[in-house]
Image (cartoon, helix red, strand yellow):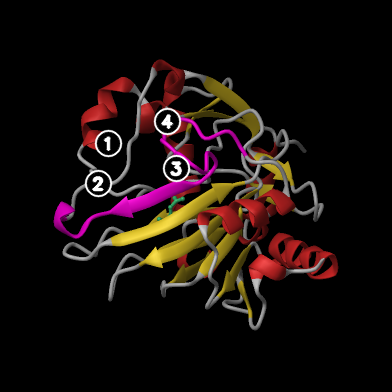
Amino acid sequence: MLTGAVGAEVVGADLGALDGHALVDVRRLLCEREVVVFRDQSLSPRSQSEFSDRLGPSAEVPFVETMIDFPHVIRVVKEADEGAAFNFGGAWHSDFSFQVEPPSFTVLAAVDVPQWGGDTVFASMTAAWMALGPQMRERLTSLEAVHTARDAYSRRLQPLHSGMRGMNIICDDSANDERVHPLVTVHPETGKEVLFFNRAYVRDFVGVGVEETAELLDFLHNHTTDVRFQYRHRWRNGDVVIWDNRSTQHFAINDYAGFRRELHRTTVRGSIPSR
Ligand code: SIN
């Protein structure tokens, strides 16, 4: 276990050579512990794609250009001389939660990580839900959250993304689309209740006024990112971290100016979030 709330490390497994039984165990652990760390892996983009496909079909990857030869792999990269400029994933989010069927799992493999800095922080939305009192739970259970990528990938944000040399992000009008998901969902594999919230993509609630929405967004963001629910991963080359987007949020810290950082990411298609 990595913290009391979230995370586990598996020692001695080779993700490129897991048999069927081991894969079932890894999936169960992922659903239970929500973030799982594997050290000293050697996944190429091809073997990462193959491993990811064993967890389920690839999610659609909007806005971000993927590798030419591996159309489901994103290179998450910031060059050493890009300074403290914008970094991909540098806001609390759950991957592509604005999709109809947001990704279940993300697989992130470290290729070239900084000597220090560039950690990724994860927070358990199951632990965040469990820490709430009965009155707040009752209030939140009736809410439907509006997810949208408009404050991340709409056209006005193109200059921000174009500042990154190593990644090609193409903003378009589909970022303004809105998708409604229950705020409190039931995890389809564990049956546990989860606060399916992240500040980057949840921008509204159905039928809630402006003031109450602002208050709720602040409350939920502050509560769900509390240190009690977190695990902070310090990357080494060869690490593979897999997380469950249905029950976590994450945040890539942008504190490594002067160092290059490259990781390869695949995402597995999930199902429609429900209660
Ligand atoms: C992401 O948000 O998927 C990227 C996380 C990271 O680069 O640490």
Give the camera-side residue of 60 and 98: 60
Residues at discs 2 and 1 in contact (Cβ within 8 Å): yes
How crowded pointer 4 is (Cα within 10 Å; few <14, some 14-19, many 20+) is rated as some
How much space separates mark 4 and mark 2, taking CA atoms?
Answer: 16 Å
Give the camera-side residue of 8 and 162: 162
**Which amino acid, by three-letter code, is at mark 4?**
Phe
Report the residue at 29% width, 70% height from top.
114
How much space separates mark 1 and mark 3, taking CA atoms?
Answer: 17 Å
Direction from residue 129 to residue 110 in the image, left or right: left
Residues at discs 4 and 2 in contact (Cβ within 8 Å): no
Task: Give the image location of residue 110, x and y in percent.
Answer: 44, 65
**Which amino acid, by three-letter code, is at mark 3?**
Met
Give the camera-side residue of 126 and 14: 14
Q: Give, as a single range, the part of the protein colored magenta.
A: 59-83
* Marks 1, 3: nearer the viewer: 3
Q: Mark 2 points at which residue?
A: 86
Q: Mark 3 points at which residue?
A: 67
Report the residue at 66% width, 57% height from top.
51
The local secondary structure at tag 2 comes to loop
Residue 65: within the magenta?
yes
The disc, 4 or 1, on the residue closer to the chain's N-terminal end is: 4
**Which amino acid, by three-letter code, is at mark 2?**
Phe
Direction from residue 154 to residue 191 in the image, left or right: right
* Marks 2, 3: nearer the viewer: 3
Q: Which residue lies furthest to the front in this view?
A: 69
How much space separates mark 2 and mark 1, taking CA atoms?
Answer: 7 Å
**Which amino acid, by three-letter code, is at mark 1?**
His
